[in-house]
Image (spheres, rainbow, N blue to C red):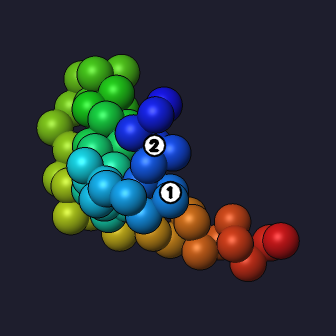
Amino acid sequence: MQDFIRVVRGEIPPLTTARVSLESHILAFAAEEARLDHATIDMSEYRTRAEQLAQQSAGSR
């Protein structure tokens, strides 16, 4: 928590970026879908589908 506060204050650089965090979450969600469906996930298609869902969700606000 102390490091987070120092990052917010600009005292130290973050250990990761929002893009890297987003990518790791997308990968985890795809892995869970693959596990549940017993299927291989094409990550390019998965990212496209996730982007479309995000845009639809943002548009409904």
Q: CA distance from mark 2 to mark 1?
A: 6 Å
The numbered mark at residue 23 is: none
Circle number at residue 4 = 2
Residue at 25% x, 49% y is: 15
Query: Observer-nearest residue: 38 or 21?
Result: 21
Image spot of residue 36 (x, y percent): 36, 21
**Residue 6 position (above or below residue 45):** above
Q: Report the side of 39 relative to 36 (left or right).
A: left
Q: Horizontal and vertical percent for residue 55? A: 59, 74
Mark 1, secondary structure of its residue: helix
Quadrant of the drawing holding the C terminus: bottom right
**Residue corresponding to mark 1:** 8
Crowd class of label 1 (few under 14; some 14 to 19; many from 20; radius 10 Å):
few
In percent of width and height, residue 29 lies at 37, 37
In the picture, measured across the screen, residue 7 lies left or right of residue 47, that is: right
User: 59 or 7: nearer the eye?
Assistant: 7
Left or right: residue 31 versus residue 60 is left
Toward the viewer: 54 or 9?
Answer: 9
Residue 30 at least partly seen:
no
Work out whether residue 25 can be spotted: yes
Toward the right, the furthest residue is 61
Q: Amino acid at mark 2?
A: Phe
Q: Quadrant of residue 25?
A: top left
